[in-house]
Image (cartoon, rainbow, N blue to C red):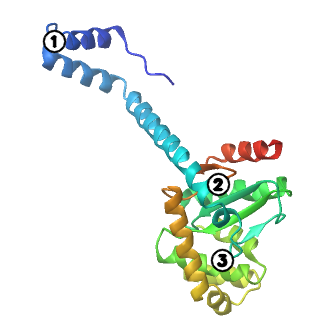
Amino acid sequence: MKFQLNATAVVLIVGAVAGGTFLGVKGFEWGVHHYIVSHPEVLLEAEQAYAAKQDAAMVAKAKLAIQAHKAEIFSDARDPFVGPANAKVTVVQFADYRCPHCKAEAAPAVLAMIRKHPDVKFVFKEWPIFGAPSQAAAHAALGAWKQGKYLPVYQAFMAEKTIDQAAIDRILREQGLDPAKTMALGSTADTAKQMLDTERLAMQLGAQGTPAFIIGDTMVPGAHMDDVEALIQKGRKG
């Protein structure tokens, strides 16, 4: 949506540019205030334009960081993944099980993409940024990965409305896993370092929150799943 000024606003701005000789500074301020009150949608447009500009700058900066950290992003043997190890296209997701956009938008789309694109590798970076319950869920998910049950646990955690230790233990039992054993497997010194490395990598890439995706040399900040799908198709053709 483009921002269009009406005739009154144009006259007011021209008057201000001319040195305030038409209505003066007070008149100009009143005119701007009146226009914004009458057209509050321009504030939303401005906010959206600023957010888009921020995202574009983030994506541009990330391209250089992706080149510098390819092995850590795409080939860290510690990370859970599904799909062919040598796939032509790899989708890397940074996520948190308490992130509302991860749960409501990103995860359902990722699971659908896994079914739709069996030739694509999907890598999961555990980045728990929403406090202790998120950290516990991430440790549990990594413990499940070590027992071959990562994807069903990921799906269940993302679908669970409230993630806390009770919910984590219940979901693990539902997936045939022993909660104590799984938490222990996912809470070793190695997995603690793995999550610290993931956090450091996210910072180096300029990611400002979850979800964030890396496909090829491009970062998609946020749950813009149409962009992820488009980049999968681009990678297949490349």
Q: Is residue 212 visible?
A: no
Residue at x 59%, y 49% (from the top left corner): 63
Residue underneath mark 1: 19
Q: Is residue 123 above or below residue 10?
A: below
Residue 132 at x, y percent in the picture = 48, 77
Of the two numbered discs 2 and 3 in the rendering, the one whose residue sits closer to the viewer: 2
In the image, residue 71 lies at what x, y percent?
67, 65
Label 2 close to label 3 by CB (< 8 Å): no
Mark 1 secondary-structure assignment: loop
Q: Amino acid at mark 1?
A: Gly
Determine which residue is flagged by label 2: 214
Say whether residue 128 is left or right of residue 6.
right
Rendered residue at 77%/46% (across/down): 235
Depth check: 74 or 174 in front?
A: 74
Residue density around tag 3, few if under 14, some if 14–19, many if 20 or more, within 10 Å = many
Along the line of sight, the residue nearer the viewer: 99 or 85: 85
The alpha-carbon separation of the residues under discs 2 and 1 comes to 50 Å
Report the Cα–Cα distance between label 2 and label 3: 21 Å
Instruction: Say the numbered circle drawn on residue 141.
Output: 3
- Contact (CB < 8 A) between labels 1 and 3? no
Q: Is residue 227 visible in the rendered structure shown here?
A: yes
In the rendered structure, the answer to whether residue 3 lies left or right of residue 184 reads: left
Q: Nearer the viewer, mark 1 or mark 3?
A: 1
Quadrant (top left/top right/bottom left/bottom right) for the C terminus: top right
The answer to whether mark 2 and mark 1 are in CB contact below 8 A is no
- Local crowd size for mark 2, using a 10 Å CA cut-off: few (<14), some (14–19), many (≥20): many
Amino acid type at mark 3? Ala
Give me the residue at 69% from left, 48% from top: 228
